[in-house]
Amino acid sequence: MQQGVRIDKWLWAVRIFKTRTMAAAVCHKGRISINDVDVKASRIVKPGDRIIVFKPPVRYCYLVTAITGQRLPAREAVLYYTDETPEQEKEKINQKCFTVYRDKGAGRPTKKDRRTIERFINQ
């Protein structure tokens, strides 16, 4: 049995992120914390650690129950963590759904328009 594994590898293995590269990128952005400390992708995760994953607008909270470095089927992956995300956080998914409409014939958004839209959505 493993003593620990990198956080990016664990997040990928238990299917919280689709790819390990995505997990590492989120760590680099400072959206992953273990026991209330922001971490890099190389941080080792152990059983008993509390991981907070910020995927705007929701802050997910997981308690690590076991360690794995291999990608698992979804049915097995849930055995490696306990989801402790409060219900009000999960409700934010449905509350903050944006659709951006553009007038017909307005063309593609400019770079400035796109950045304004992204800034508005990621608040």
Image (cartoon, rainbow, N blue to C red):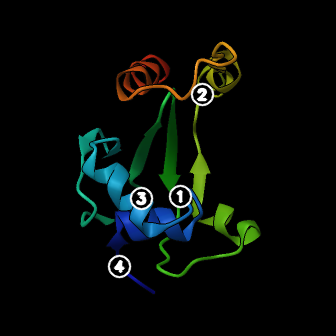
Does residue 114 appear in this view? yes
Alpha-carbon distance for marks 1 and 3? 6 Å
Left or right of 34 in this view: 92: right
The percent coordinates of residue 114 (x first, y second) are 43, 26
Q: Is residue 67 above or below residue 58?
A: below
Q: Position of residue 29 (x, y in %)?
A: 28, 44
Amino acid, disc 1: Phe
Q: Mark 2 is on which residue type?
A: Pro
Q: Which residue is mark 3?
A: 23
Secondary structure beneath dot 2 equals: loop
Tell me the residue that label 4 is attached to. 3
Among numbered discs 4 and 1, the one appearing first in the sequence: 4
Mark nearest the camera among 4 and 1 is: 1
Rounded to the nearest angstrom, the CA distance separating label 3 from label 4 is 20 Å
The amino acid type, in three-letter code, at marker 3 is: Ala
- Whether tag 2 and tag 1 are in contact, CB under 8 A, the answer is no
CA distance for labels 2 and 1: 20 Å
Q: Please report whichever mark, 2 or 4, sits nearer to the chain's N-terminal start.
A: 4
Give the vertical position of 83 relative to 18 (above or below): above
| Mark 2 touches mark 4? (CB < 8 Å) | no
**Amino acid at circle 4:** Gln
- What residue is at 23 percent from the left and 56 percent from the top? 40
Nearer the N terminus, badge 2 or badge 1? Answer: 1
- Residue 42 sits in quarter: bottom left
